[in-house]
Amino acid sequence: MDSEKLSKTISEARKKKNLSQKELGDLLGVSNKAVSKWENGESTPRRESLIKLCEILELDKVEILGFEQKDSKNEIDSLKSENDKLKNQIEGINKRQKKALKYIFAFAIIFVVLAVGVSLVLTKSTAQNDKINDLSQSKTKIVFADKEFVPVYKELEYTVNHEFDFNSCEQKYATYITKSGEKKKVLIYCNAYSDFVALKAGGKNYYYANEKVNYLKCDKKYIESIETDASSIINNNFYEHNSLLFGNELYNGDKNELIDYINADKKAVSKKIVERYLGNKTRRIIICLKSNEDISNINITSFCPGEFFKDDKEKIYFYDYNTSCAYEVGKELGENVYK
């Protein structure tokens, strides 16, 4: 379904259910602005949001999603079915043709061996990824399907790590280009839209994005608005709950000051402060991105760089999701966050 038809379908179905944009957004865990953008054709929902939309608005999933997930099991079942047909043919051969029968049995054995080999290929191993020592570092690239993918910006790593769905991905081989320009074979996970790919190595996940995703860093010119809410990804598992619990508010302070603070190099405070107070009187920061032709096909319309919290003396700190460290906040900025 194209974006124009999708936006019209969402709008009509929402009105039919007598839901406001805000009510629908609350049910989906997004802001009413995000719903407005969908209905105006300015952006499209993520696949997870589309599935929820289909359930809430009673829409046809096949028509809305527009694709079917490939299943490697179907390929194996197909091979097994062909093998069964071959055995039936062998059983029907006249016993007097013993010589020919030997050749056919030999062919059957080879076919089974090939079938097992194919199944092993379908169950690919990520062992070769462990041999690469500069994963996710600057100037490395992944080349796949005539596209180049670069490491995601630090501000996006936490968000992508929670939103990337490995279960809906296929495993594909791709070319990895090291910092020195050396080419290596790697196994990646790619989603339906191929804007993001992931690698598994050494028990960790590494994410690479189509170069147009570069626009999604904390760059002021691509930020439409900044919101805050009282949720904490750390303590409330925000990705399983949603903003129905909390409700978003626009940040009314100096946006440039806030972004400069997030991007600046800061000295981390003691981990004991984090262990004791993280999640106390939290204000989570949500960066909402502008609709832009360069990023319109990307399914991330907002991301969360971190959250503010207070200690027992009302001193304010910022916890960065990417670095997993907390930093002390100046009085003026802190007062703006907690207005």
Image (tube, rainbow, N blue to C red):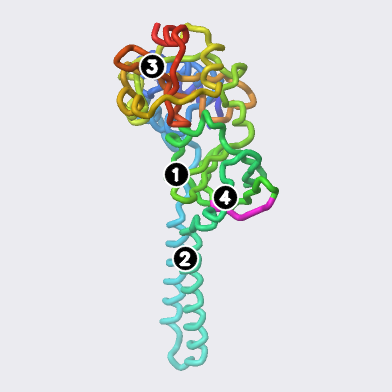
In the image, is residue 143 above or below residue 110?
Answer: above
**Numbered disc 1: secondary structure:** helix
Mark 3 secondary-structure assignment: strand
Q: Which residue is mark 4?
A: 133
* In this rendering, the label closer to the viewer, 4 or 1: 4
Q: Report, in whole angstroms, how far the alpha carbon at label 2 lies from the one at label 1.
A: 26 Å
User: Between disc 4 and disc 2, whose residue precedes?
Assistant: 2
Residue 12 screen position, x and y as percent? 44, 19
Please give the name of the residue rendered at 36% of the width and 26% of the height, measured from the top-left corner.
274
Pick whichever, 160 or 76, lies toward us.
160
What amino acid is at disc 2? Leu
Dot 1 crowding, Cα within 10 Å, few <14, some 14–19, many 20+:
few
The correct choice, above or below, for 226 with respect to 156 in the image is: above
Task: From the image, give the main secondary structure of the stretch colored magenta.
Answer: strand
- Residue kind at label 1, given as amino acid type: Phe
Q: Which tag, 2 or 1, sits closer to the chain's start? A: 2
Q: Nearer the viewer, mark 2 or mark 1?
A: 1
Give me the residue at 47% from left, 10% from top: 333
- Write down the residue under mark 2: 79
Tell me the SS state at disc 4. loop
Badge 3 or badge 2: first in the primary sequence: 2
Q: Check if mark 4's residue and mark 2's residue have beta carbons within 8 Å.
A: no
Give the Cα separation between the discs numbered 3 and 2: 55 Å
Sequence-wise, which precedes: disc 3 or disc 4? 4
Q: Which numbered disc, 4 or 2, marks the residue closer to the eye?
A: 4
Residue linked to disc 1: 166
Tag 4: Cα neighbours inside 10 Å, few (<14), some, or many (≥20)?
few
SS of the residue under disc 2:
helix
Label 4 – label 1 distance at C-alpha = 23 Å
Residue type, numbered disc 3: Arg
The segment highlighted magenta reads: 182-187
